Image (cartoon, grey):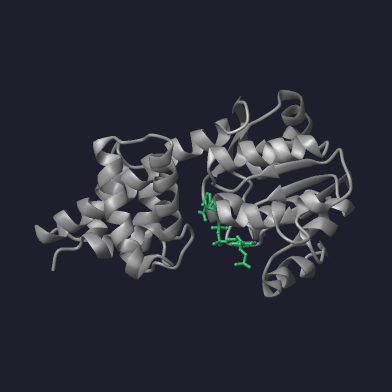
Amino acid sequence: MNTTKIGWIGLGNMGIPMATQLIEAGYEVTAYNRSKAKEGTLKEIGALLAETPKNLLVQTDVVFVMVSDDAAIEAIFNGTNGILSAMVSGKTIINMSTVSPSISRQMAAACTAKGHHYLDAPVSGSVKQAETGQLVIMVGGDELAFNKVKPILEKLGKLAMRVGDTGAGNNAKLAINSLLALYAQGLAETVVFANAQGIKTEDLLSLINNAAIGNIFTKIKGDAIIADQYQAAFALKHIVKDLNLAKAEGISSPLAKTALQTFESASVRYGEEDIIAVIKEVKVD
Ligand code: NAP
C-alpha cells in the first residue's frame, strides 16, 4: 500500500477509469462526485467516499480534480463545502480537467493563499488510454510540487511532462485539442466524400490505417464510424468548450474557426454523443 492518501473529485467517463488505476496501484483513494449514483462503481473496488469536496481535502494529501469545465471547477473549489473552505493547508491539488488557463491562475492563487500547491495537469487520450494508464499528461505549475507527485501521475499516464508555470498545461491541452477537432472533422469529411464516390467505409479505413496518415485516432474513430456507434468516449459538447477556450486564448486560424462553427452546429443535435458523431453533421443528404 502506498502511504500517500489520494482524493479523487469527478467520476465521469475519464474520472472513473483514472481513479481505478490509482486503486489498482495500491493507493488509498477517497472519492467524491456531485451525483452520488456514480460513486458506487468506485466503492465496489475499495474506494472510500467523502460527503463533500471540503471533507475530501481534509482526509487526503493529494487531490485530483477531473470535472467538465470552468463552472464545475468554480463549484468544486469555491462552492458551499468546496475544497477552499477546508481549514487545512499543505495539500497538493491537481486539476486534470480541460479548463481555461485563467481559471487555473485564479485557483492557483487561492490555493497558495491557503498554503496548498496547485498544478494544472490536463490529459491527452480518452477512455481507452485512461483504462490502461496510457494517458499523456501536460503540467503547469511549481517544479518541486510536480516532481513530488510525478510518480503518482506516472500511474495514470505513459508521459507526465511539465511544460511551464501555472496555466501552461491548459494552454498545451487547448493546442492539442484544436488538432483533435481538425482530425475529427477531417476524418468525417473524408469518409463522406469517399462514400459519395462509391467507396465503402471499411475499405477506405483499411487504406487510411495502413497508410502514413493512419493513427490511433483514425483506428478507434474509424471503428466507431463502421459500427455506426457514437456513444461518448469524449463527448462532442466538450470539444465545443475546448475550441471556445482556445479562441479566448487567441487562436484564430482558418481551420480552427471553421471547426468551431461545425462543432457548435453539430452540438445542437449530437452534443452528448462522441466527437466523431460530427460525421452526421457533415453528411450531405
Ligand atoms: P463527463 O463524463 O462529462 O464527466 C464530467 C464530470 O464533471 C462528472 O463527474 C460531473 O458530475 C462533473 N461536473 C460537471 N459539472 C459539475 C459541477 N457544476 N459541479 C460538480 N461537478 C460537476 O466528462 P469526462 O469525459 O470525464 O471529462 C472530464 C474532463 O476531462 C473534461 O474537462 C474533458 O474535456 C476532459 N477530457 C475528456 C476526455 C475524454 O475522452 N472523455 C479526454 C481528455 C480530456 P456529475 O456526474 O454529477 O454530472
Front one among 27 and 235: 235
In the image, residue 217 lies at what x, y percent?
40, 48
**Relative height, residue 140 to residue 84 (above, below):** above
Q: Residue at 82%, 39% (x, y): give it.
A: 114
In the image, residue 47 lies at what x, y percent?
81, 62
Q: Ligand 1 lies in which image quarter? A: bottom right
Screen quadrant of the C terminus: bottom left
Is 109 on the left or on the right of 281, as rendered?
Answer: right
User: Residue 29, located in which quarter of the rendered image?
Assistant: bottom right
In the image, residue 44 lies at what x, y percent?
78, 70
Is 78 on the left or on the right of 166, as rendered?
Answer: right
Front one among 177 and 52: 52
In the image, residue 194 lies at what x, y percent?
15, 55
Q: Residue at 78%, 54% (x, y): give it.
A: 23
**Relative height, residue 89 to residue 79 (above, below):** above
Residue positioned most to the left: 197
Q: Residue at 61%, 40% (x, y): give it.
A: 104
Q: Residue at 55%, 53% (x, y): give it.
A: 69
